[in-house]
Image (tube, rainbow, N blue to C red):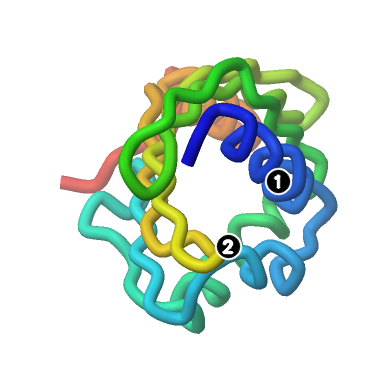
Amino acid sequence: MNSNEALAFCNRWLPCWTGNRPDVLVDCYAPEVFYRDPANPGGIRGKEALRAYLVRLLAVYPDWVWECEEVFPVDGGFVLKWRATIPVAGEIVQETGMDLVLIDNGLVVRNEVYFDRTALLAAEGRRHGQRGGPRRSA
């Protein structure tokens, strides 16, 4: 995949993350997808399991917006440097991170999301009235 192809894919895929449309988003993924993010370090396997996760995730963040900053083509896909604007209870959290995105026949087969979610967790803690960020269980 070259840079132009990666950018074209991002222009179709990233808007699907906004608007609480899990079925639209999951249609970008292959049935055998592997997805990993900071909340799922062991990963999620399969389109149906990913859909179940996205239903919950997008319901919490229906208005977040993901933007492509740069793409770096790799064999079979690209690495995406992104910026996200995430409204949390009247506060705007800005995050930057990177994804590994591997594509087969126009669908994502592997998506690994990496970012420091400290600011997001702190905002969530404030949303839920916790001081100093979210509580962690032992």
Q: Secondary structure at mark 1?
A: loop
The numbered disc on residue 36 is none
Q: Is residue 46 above or below residue 41?
A: below
Percent coordinates x, y for residue 105 in the rendering: 52, 68
Left or right of 24? Residue 32 is left
Q: Secondary structure at mark 2?
A: loop
- Mark 1 nearby-residue class (10 Å; few <14, some 14–19, many ≥20): some
Hey, what amino acid is under mark 2? Gly
Give the CA separation, mark 2 to mark 1: 26 Å
Question: Is residue 117 shown to the viewer in this render?
Answer: no
Residue at point 75% right, 38% down? 11
* Disc 1: which residue: 61
Residue at point 72% right, 59% down? 59
How many marks on residues?
2
* Disc 2: which residue: 106
Mark with earlier residue (2, 1): 1
Residue at point 61% right, 16% down? 69
Residue 128: name its quadrant: top right
Furthest residue toward left = 138
- Mark 2 nearby-residue class (10 Å; few <14, some 14–19, many ≥20): few
Residue at point 57% right, 33% down? 124
- Is residue 29 or residue 115 the one in the foreground? 29
Q: Nearer the viewer, mark 2 or mark 1?
A: 2
Percent coordinates x, y for residue 68 in the rendering: 64, 25
